[in-house]
Amino acid sequence: MVSYDIPFRIEKMSSDLAELKQLVNKLHASLCYQEALWDNSDMIRYFKVSDRTLAYWRSSSLISYRKINGKIYYTKVDREAFLEQHKVNLNDCNLNKGRRILS
């Protein structure tokens, strides 16, 4: 190995590491956004329910959650699973009950 190659290689590795760091930070930010943790106040605001209703959902195992240092958090996966479990299909609804259907 020639000694003049070492500073060039160090410079190249430093540049590559900086680029890698930027990519990792972008990926991390993307994952954090997608997997953002919501606390109780976020859930109450989004679903427009009371604190007691949310506690009931948790105690009835209607929604999954994480408890960290006594604080409750909900992941995006938890929230989406809850919504999917409580989805009402149009075929399941009797929207036309007692109504005359026009053809």
Image: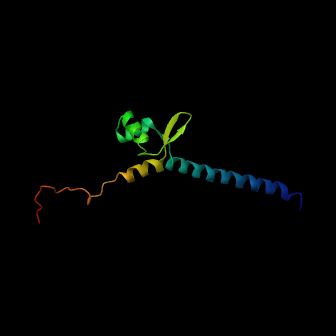
> In the displayed image of the protein, which residue is found farthest to the bottom?
103
Q: Nearer the viewer, residue 7 or 64?
A: 64
Q: Quadrant of residue 46?
A: top left
Left or right: 44 as drawn, with respect to 15: left
- Locate residue 47, reporting x and y percent: 36, 41
Left or right: 76 as drawn, with respect to 96: right
- Locate residue 19, reporting x and y percent: 66, 53
Question: Total of numbered circles in the picture?
Answer: 0
Quadrant location of the N terminus? bottom right
Left or right: 16 as drawn, with respect to 80: right
Left or right: 93 as drawn, with respect to 31: left
Q: Nearer the viewer, residue 22 or 89?
A: 89
Q: Nearer the viewer, residue 23 or 35?
A: 35
- Locate residue 82, reporting x and y percent: 41, 49
**Residue at image coords 15%, 56%:** 97
Q: Nearer the viewer, residue 10 or 52?
A: 52
